[in-house]
Image (spheres, helix red, strand yellow):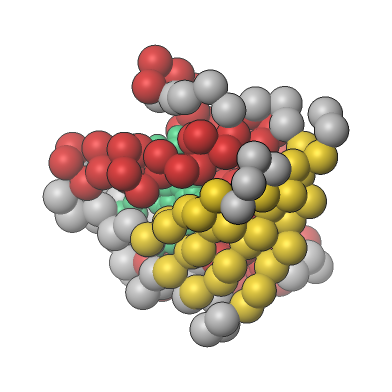
Amino acid sequence: MKGIVFTELVEHVERAHGTDMADRIIERACPRSGGSYTAVGDYHHAELIALVGAMAAQTGRSAGEIQRDFGRALFARLAARKTSILPGSAFECLVQVESIIHRDVRMLYPSAELPSIVCERRGSDILVVDYASERPFADLARGLIEGCLAHYGERAEIREEEQDGARRRRFVLTRLAA
Ligand code: HEM
């Protein structure tokens, strides 16, 4: 996985709990890289799972909640770098993750390990988002979806259908009045 996900996670912990906690988490997770990440470097996704596990142990929250929380923050940070190309609504943005946003990431960073995000519109107020990956980050995907809605100031009910642990998940979004 690209280092940007790791640098953002470390900064996220530092913002929420301070640098001492971030150091303790890295120490506890004992990542092979030693925990000093660069945005364009490549690291094994097991390190992310270990860091999230160490955060869970330190804070008493579940790994799923931590991934979700981080996903919300991560969307805001990624979107801040990409404002010129983001479309006008959350549903349009989600529809374009696969065909435009992640496609651009893949072109810039051929070593990026990206999930498949396939969307299907069911009328104007329902969007089905299918997450599939070789990595188990469905909770992170949910957080990114929530971050996307928040970015546009939109609200939706999100129903989840688990399909293969955390590697495949269907999210059914029903738009709610803002
Ligand atoms: C501004 C919007 C977005 C940008 C710039 C972006 C970019 C990226 C980048 C750079 C990575 C890391 C690739 C790697 O680790 O090698 C990534 C991974 C990922 N992205 Fe996006 N992304 C965006 C929106 C989204 C949204 C809305 C979703 C959810 C529907 C999503 C789902 C994921 C997931 C779950 C991963 C982790 C890798 C995996 O699950 O296999 N992304 N994205």
Viewer-nearest residue: 41 or 175: 175
Residue 3 lies left or right of residue 170; in this view the side is: left
- Which residue is found at the position 38% from the left and 22% from the top? 85
- Which residue is found at the position 41% from the left and 43% from the top? 97
Instruction: Pinpoint residue 149: horizontal percent, then vertical percent.
Output: 66, 37
The quarter of the picture where residue 113 lies is bottom left
Residue 135 lies left or right of residue 12; in this view the side is: left
- Which residue is found at the position 16% from the left and 41% from the top? 107
Residue 21 seen anywhere in this rendered image of the structure: no
Establish if 141 lies above or below 20.
below
Instruction: Pinpoint residue 54: horizontal percent, then vertical percent.
Output: 61, 68
Quadrant (top left/top right/bottom left/bottom right) for the C terminus? top right
Establish if 167 lies above or below 129.
below
Viewer-nearest residue: 42 or 142: 142
Instruction: Pinpoint residue 127: horizontal percent, then vertical percent.
Output: 60, 50
Instruction: Pinpoint residue 45: horizontal percent, then vertical percent.
Output: 38, 66
Residue 164 seen anywhere in this rendered image of the structure: yes
The quarter of the picture where residue 14 lies is top right
In this view, the residue farthest toward the front is 123
Quadrant (top left/top right/bottom left/bottom right) for the N terminus? bottom left
